[in-house]
Amino acid sequence: MSTPMPDNQAVARKTTTQFNQKFAEVAESCRPKLHEWIERPLEVMSFKPDTSAWFQCHPAHRMTIDELASTPVGKGDDFILDFGGHRVGYFSFHLGAVGNNIDAPCRLRLTFGEVPPDVTENLADCKSWISTSWLPDEVINVDWLPTNVDMPRRYSFRYVRIQVIDTSQQYRALFSDVRVRAVSSVSPETFNSVPALNDSRPLLHKIDAVSQRTLRNCMHTVFEDGPRRDRRLWSGDLRLQALTNYATFKDFALVKRCLYMFAAVAGADGSLPACLYEFPTLHAASDYIVDYDALFGAMVYDYAVASSDLDTARDLWPTVVGSLTTALSHLSPTTGAFDSARSDLWKFLDWDLTLHADAGMHGVVLYCCKRVDALAELLGYPPRYEAAIASMTAAATTAFYDSAAGVFVSGPAHQISWLSQAWLALAGALPPDQSMAALLRTMKDPAALKPLCPYGWATFAEALAVCGAKEECLKLLETYWGGMVERGADTFWECFDPKDYRKSPYQDYRNNSYCHAWSCSPAWLLRSVLFPDS
Amino acid sequence: MSTPMPDNQAVARKTTTQFNQKFAEVAESCRPKLHEWIERPLEVMSFKPDTSAWFQCHPAHRMTIDELASTPVGKGDDFILDFGGHRVGYFSFHLGAVGNNIDAPCRLRLTFGEVPPDVTENLADCKSWISTSWLPDEVINVDWLPTNVDMPRRYSFRYVRIQVIDTSQQYRALFSDVRVRAVSSVSPETFNSVPALNDSRPLLHKIDAVSQRTLRNCMHTVFEDGPRRDRRLWSGDLRLQALTNYATFKDFALVKRCLYMFAAVAGADGSLPACLYEFPTLHAASDYIVDYDALFGAMVYDYAVASSDLDTARDLWPTVVGSLTTALSHLSPTTGAFDSARSDLWKFLDWDLTLHADAGMHGVVLYCCKRVDALAELLGYPPRYEAAIASMTAAATTAFYDSAAGVFVSGPAHQISWLSQAWLALAGALPPDQSMAALLRTMKDPAALKPLCPYGWATFAEALAVCGAKEECLKLLETYWGGMVERGADTFWECFDPKDYRKSPYQDYRNNSYCHAWSCSPAWLLRSVLFPDS
């Protein structure tokens, strides 16, 4: 392999899964019904090169879908269908033919594009360290025409590029009844009945709508991280999805299902995997992320508050306690500060590999301990982490706070990053006004390390909102998520750097996901934190 | 298209199909049950370059199938399975995985090879004027491993090349339980119960066995011309298949079905298409070949003699008469000789486009008139073509026989071809001894045009046998069909030029078929004509 995965990601969870059948059965009992509806393409179009456009091209109308149905296509023909917005589901069409004889199969390449480059660029030479099997193209051979073609795999797309590799000299093909049987655990009725945002700014409404569509299109039999890639349940993503879901679709059962799925695959050491697989059967991934593990308790707390389902919280309490064990083992016995070097395990926070994680991880763990003690209070249990919280709160200042600069720093180079400020703010390591000041100072510091992905930006936006910097939070939503909207997003992207459309955590942006769970949080921030009347 | 189809083939049948529902229903009542059985690969192998070998490569063992089951494969791995002989059916396997996580789909290219070049050469740049959709490669994406993969299309192959396009860095794939669910209308019991050939020469036994396998692998719900390409019923091919079937598997119902299918799609002018399609519903191809049309009566005669089913022959009698109309319309009113210029319709005889067809076509039509009058006699009908037969017999000599040279010639350049001699010999245009002499003289004439495909060679071999030149016929079987056996054929090929493995009627041999109906006739010639005691 020319491009190895980053070393930290290669470290597997160091425990044995203790499969809990009872928890797995609870999860199974919460399996949602998937709703289905039909959507059709709006037009046949093409993309024209345009260096002034974000993705280096602009759309151009070619013909209507009715015209397509009477336009024979043959070898070398190439066209793009635009469904008008992001869809997740099963693609089908009627493949007719005109000519003397339909004397050979019809060979087609279909490419399912979430964004224009998926259908304008050559995907064959994609070099990313994650699997190129995720690339959204498919070659099919249809033996006998006319026929209905129902493609069996699920796709995630707005655009479908169809390249006719060959028909024969005797016939050409005709496409009609093109459709997608869209699927989600969110019904169209639920999707359409979310109340409008209580604010009049059009851009905020757009951001809100795109957030909701992102979340809906990731909601299937689990909260998937991305319906195109990786199509599975990741813990950190789940936290943001669940919070946004509480503010919109309120599908508590799906959250409950996902929490129990994690609990079902807890390790002998109490740890939870960073992600898990539903198929072929429920099992833990070997991927392990210290911060994702620690966040489980916060997710159970959020669920209990949103759903009032305290029975589930009680049932999961031992799992919650176990899930903090590994994170807490990283606290230095001498300084009380989080020390990444205490293990080779993966500390994520965001995809930027230059981020020094200690300060941010300290914030995560302190935040989680406080949430778990809040959960204990909700359940009538005694507080469990009082001493740790006190010690970590002190250490946050002594180990990470540069009082002269008024910001948190991390590592021997005293790295100033947005994420260190954000997690320590969320953790309440300082009073809110000081936290807010650190956040705002960092935003103004051109040398400060910004997040790479919306997961990191969401953390920062949340921190702004929680500390009371609502206007700054709104502005950040408008510039960052609004920046995606202005660049054509109808679902939010896995990775967005406003200066570089090719940016990717995977060495090649053609393997990025463009409907990604961890990017959906603006709908939650807008509705529950910024405009709580919505 | 860079390579247009030959002009003559582009001429469509000039009539309207009069669909005969009653005939179609008879055909449907004869639809065979398809038999299924499981076959497994014998080994994992590769081909090594070898310019001394026919296909420029020789096989080399790599590992056993058991070893494959415990050999993980990943991105870039490439191996070939050898099933030990030609198979037609549905390919399946169990796709397992080893590694930390099966965290991505598995993308595979599978190429189904009838002969080594299918799995050693790059197929992507194949330039043939027939559809490249026939090329036997397939790309699949398997979402969730481990799983059984059942490929839905039917393939025709001995070798299966599997290229692992990608798994992921987290896992590699494992292949086990690889199999083909082979299908044919000929059951294994029937296939294995054909009596041995009554001769001791090993090569003849091999030729006989390969012929039978060729025929069996073409027998499905119709007699297909080739199970890889074109997978449909052609009239001229059917004649040789039916005759070989009578000498081996004796499936009269499948012949009856095919005869009725042609009758069901006869034209308003009485003509029959050169081929027809069973799917999506029974319909005529627009392809029309004058000689194929004319041969229908001879096929009904052969069927009636072999099966003793005279009711079918009576029912099809009007179709038989109609099917001679177009061929007879090519006879010159002045000379009585077949004149290709009287239409632009396709006169085939064989794929060599340099063949001057008049003499050979004259032979075909005379042969067919005689067979149809023999059928009339069998049915107790008055002879119908006595005058035409007399006139054509005379014209055969006056228009085409060069008495000085002792051979038939065709066209202004007095072309001497093997096929002119063959068809006029089969037609009995001269007494058998003179016919035999013409055949043998032509064989010795290095300037005489030879057939290109086994269809033409089969006609010549038949003519030798019918005229009493049995030793020469045997020798021809040994050199031509035996030549394929010696070059590794386990089914007979669509096209074989002993001097050029790249020869093709389609401009590119990578689109040739290597299990082709019209090549199966040695089993018939050996059993019914040369060694009738078999």
Image (cartoon, coloured by chain):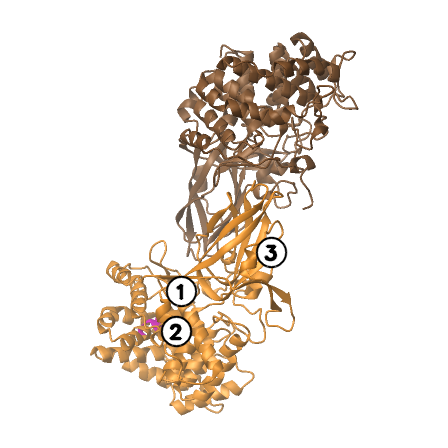
Chain colours: A brown, B orange
In 3D space, how far apart are the residues under numbered discs 2 and 1 (Cα atoms)? Answer: 12 Å
Chain part drawn in magenta: B293-297
In 3D space, how far apart are the residues under numbered discs 1 and 3 (Cα atoms)? Answer: 32 Å
**Chain where mark 3 sits:** B
- Spot occupied by residue B5 in the image (x, y as percentages of width and height): 50, 62
- Spot occupied by residue B360 in the image (x, y as percentages of width and height): 43, 78
Name the one closer to the observer, A440 or B352.
Answer: A440
* Mark 2 residue element: helix
Dot 2: within a 10 Å radius of its alpha carbon, few (fewer than 14), some, or many (20 or more) residues?
A: many
**Mark count:** 3
Residue B224: give its label. Answer: 1
Mark closer to the observer (1, 3):
3
> As shown in the figure, which amino acid type bears the numbered disc 2?
Leu
| Location of residue B70 with respect to A347 vertically, above or below | below
Q: Earlier in the sequence, mark 2 or mark 3?
A: 3
Residue B78: give its label. Answer: 3
Name the one closer to the observer, B219 or B158.
Answer: B158
Residue drawn at point x = 70 percent, y = 10 percent: A437
* Mark 3 residue element: strand
Residue B240: give its label. Answer: 2
